[in-house]
Amino acid sequence: MTRTITYSLRLGARSSAEYHRTIAAFADGWIASTLPQVADVARDFQAYLKESGQAERSETEIAFEMLVLGVLLREHGADISLQPAWYLNLMENLVRLQTVWPRLEPVVKTCRGLAGGIWTRRALRESGPSGVTGLNAWLRANGEEGRARRLEQWEAFLTTLGDPRPQQVLLRCRALASDFAERSLLDLGKYTDGVAGFLSNEAPSYRFRYDAAFVSRSRLEYHLGMLGTEILNRAYRQRFLSAGRKVVIVPPCMRAKPEGECQAVETPFGARCQACTPACRVHQVTRLGEKHGFEVFIIPDELHVFGSGAGPDDLGLVGVSCALTNWSGGWEADSLSVPAQGLLLDYVGCTYHWDKHGIPTDTNFHALQALLGIQENGRQANHKESQ
């Protein structure tokens, strides 16, 4: 049996089919109970988006964004307020340097880890930005630019409201988070039993690593990611099905062989499998793509490569990644006008964050085919059918 590091969608079974049924039912219930609670804020936010010339979004997407705000402020607000602006700016600049000069990535990551580790050990004398402004600065300092860009719209929206409305909206976001914390633990907690042990036993050893904040995310944030992938898949579904070109991007941790032995060839859109290992799950997804007419690449360094090639009306992406990252990948693709569908890894195991030797990861192939509109008999589903 594969070792569970933080979460597992299989619960000891061979398949994650039960999880996919559970998250769909959970999302149905969450949407039904939440939309009436946020209808007035959703209407005001939709009006703000329209007046400011930004892309409109559904009430369900807006409700989820309010939940994101509530969860992130609940989980990180106190720590963010203790990180002064100069420190957040330093960390953001290091992240930017890493992006502009990829050859310096190992050195920059070491510097980020040292800066973060030293800061957590020093006496806290300064206060930093708070609220949504502080949250966005903290996200950028941790390399989460896509999330910050989306939540910047909420920062701007709140400034258009007269006092005390901004604080009232944020209090409602926090209330959504509190309710979600209870409900998600009951329904989704069985999939995240390993998180508490990892946070207690292993996360402290990451103190001087660049990804210390990432691997230290709470159980609640895993549940947020699970719901987020389901919500955004529904929001982008029809646009995705209408796209003429389909691409699946998979993480390198799904390879059977480590990086030095894998024979995948680099392309502008990420590495392409060369079929060196028949049992490799990347190879198997690639063969499925050859049969059904979609392309497969190992995740590139930046998603923007997909927004600069085929054109926004022609390309639909399926992104496979872990529960902590998958949903915000949907936001990033949407910012490029590329509709995406997300699919969670059944468990984590990459060498970048979770296991020094690496555990080859896996995902649910039936769920992948369903996202791509491939019916059980192998035919491509009608693009007009709803999911």
Image (cartoon, rainbow, N blue to C red):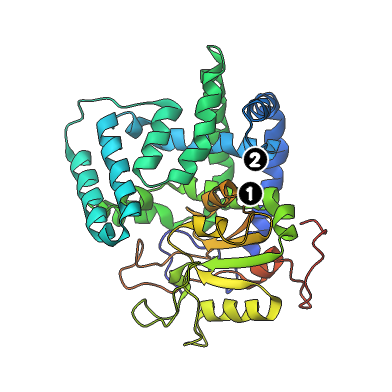
Callout 1 environment at 10 Å: few (<14), some (14 to 19), or many (20+)? many
Q: Residue at left 70%, top 34%?
A: 35
Q: Which of marks 1 and 2 is nearer the N terminus?
A: 2
- Give whichever of 192, 312 is nearer the camera: 312
What amino acid is labelled 2 in the image?
A: Glu
Query: Left of 244 or right of it: where is 271?
Result: left
User: What x and y, as percent, mark residue 368?
Assistant: 64, 68
Question: 28 or 85: which is nearer to us?
Answer: 85
**Residue 232 numbered tag:** 1
Residue 92, quarter of the rendered image: top left
The residue singled out by tag 2 in the image is 61
Looking at the picture, does residue 236 appear above or below residue 15? above
Amino acid found under the numbered disc labelled 1: Leu
Q: Which residue occupies the foreground of this view, 111 or 188?
A: 111
Report whether 336 appears left or right of 195: right
Measuring from the top left, give residue 249's x and y in whole percent.
54, 66
Where's the C terminus, which quadrant? bottom right
Residue 175's disc is none
Residue 168: in sight, yes or no? Answer: yes
